[in-house]
Image (tube, rainbow, N blue to C red):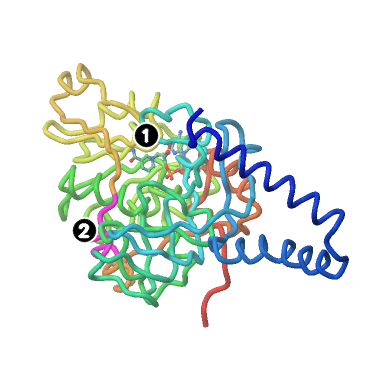
Amino acid sequence: MSDGETRPRRVFARLITFSMYTLTIMPISNRLILGAVAAILPVMARAQSTKPMMKAIVIHEYGGPEVLKYEDVPRPEPKENEALVRVIAAGVNPVDALIRTGKYAKFFGTTLPLIPGYDIAGIVEKTGAKITKLKAGDSIYAYVLWGGGYAEYAVATEGEATAKPKSLNYIEAAAAPLVALTAWQALIDTAKLSAGQTVLIHGGSGGVGSMAIQIAKARGAKVIATASTSNQELLKQLGADVAIDYTKTKFEDVAKDVDVVLDSVGKDTLARSYGVVRKGGIIATLVAEPDQAELDKHGIRGAAISVKPNASELAEITKLIEEKKIKPVVSQVLPLTEAVKAQEQAATHHTRGKIVLKIADEPK
Ligand SMILES: NC(=O)c1ccc[n+]([C@@H]2O[C@H](COP(=O)([O-])OP(=O)(O)OC[C@H]3O[C@@H](n4cnc5c(N)ncnc54)[C@H](OP(=O)(O)O)[C@@H]3O)[C@@H](O)[C@H]2O)c1
């Protein structure tokens, strides 16, 4: 038998011998000292190795709202291209509930466990070595591609985060990034909406729609928007030139020959939208693939939008916010512990503006 094989046995034997000695021969005073040292050592070891912790909503298994667990978890450590952000508020989006179900885990590339939340507003705590624009103490807001917003700390890259608008508090700021970028990328990047054109915005009272109306107006377009009866006044306040109550009026009876349709509803609403677009116009939809046969039939273009983080575009949105041309609509503010309630509301698809989770007090 080699020495390598016998060494563990010898060590084990010595341990047994030492234990016997402490239990029998060793004086009681020495045993007490040894006991105290034994008790303190693990505490010291833990104190040295303990990672800073934070409160977060964690999903360990896909499912209904009940899988959202409020827990203590280690704070994320920023990689060299990331900033660690102390989150003051996190926006809630319908997609959060969709991801929680796991139905599109492959499509979104999500793995468990995960912390939901794509919109954050907060303060930079520290930065990775390759971060050049952000610094500790900066107030920022961001659409973070990999989530993690329902937590006291999250990480963001410089491609995701930009300076928080000074005219908004953190709650309002957290309501903006994902929906404002979606509206921007649909109307401006994709549809190239220009002054004097007409746009039909479905779901004008929701998160995306409320931003889209204001961005389109800031662009100088004429806006026709749809929502249910209780949201007609809101559509007008946001700047819609024509407000349609979809529960009473068929939008195609009012909207004709529009240049652009922004569809956040899909199904029958999308199916009936092809006919209201002028030849050469475009339908940008957030929730489906446009039907190529219908597009061809009407001589129009179509696009399925998939929003991406974009810090430069978010900075453009910030300018519009500071110029008081656009402002997020926040209908509900809930504590982090009520993430279940927030996601249940977001999943109804009848949210007025946005729901925001308040995670910490607004800094003075
Ligand atoms: N593809 C992407 O990149 C992307 C990005 C963002 C969002 N989305 C998706 O787009 C959808 C909208 O997002 P959101 O954040 O704006 O949702 P939201 O805040 O829930 O708003 C949905 C709005 O649609 C309205 N609505 C419901 N049924 C309608 C109908 N038949 N006709 C007209 N309006 C109707 C509701 O108004 P009433 O309450 O008055 O009915 C509500 O205000 C969601 O499915 C979301 O997941 C996709």
The residue tagged with tag 1: helix, strand or loop? loop
Q: Nearer the viewer, residue 167 or 12?
A: 12
Residue found at x 16% / y 30%: 301
Question: Residue 128: x, y in percent?
Answer: 31, 65
Residue 175 is at least partly visible in this image = no
Q: Is residue 336 above or below residue 85?
A: above
Residue positioned 47% across, 69% down in the render:
170
Q: Which kind of residue does numbered mark 2 sit on?
A: Arg
Residue situated in front as seen by the camera: 147 or 231:
147
Q: Where 303 falls versus 292 (above or below)?
A: below
List x then y, in percent, for residue 295.
19, 23
Q: Badge 2: few (under 14), some or many (20 or more) residues near its Cα, within 10 Å?
A: some
- For marks 1 and 2 on the same chain, the one whose residue lies earlier in the sequence: 1
- Helix, strand or loop for disc 2: loop
What is the number of callouts on the image?
Answer: 2
- Of residues 319 and 139, the one drawn nearer to the viewer in this rendering: 139
| Residue ranking furthest to the top | 293
Q: Is residue 53 inside the magenta stretch?
A: no
Q: Which residue is mark 2?
A: 219
Q: Residue at x 52, y 38 (%)?
A: 97
Mark 1 crowd level (few <14, some 14–19, many ≥20, 10 Å Cα):
few
Stretch of the chain drawn in magenta: 309-317
**For the stretch drawn in magenta, what is the main secondary structure?**
helix
Q: Which residue is mark 1?
A: 109
Q: Is residue 348 visible?
A: yes
Q: Quadrant of residue 314?
A: bottom left
Amino acid type indicated by mark 1:
Gly
**Position in image of residue 130 (x %, y %):** 24, 64
Q: Which mark is residue 136?
A: none
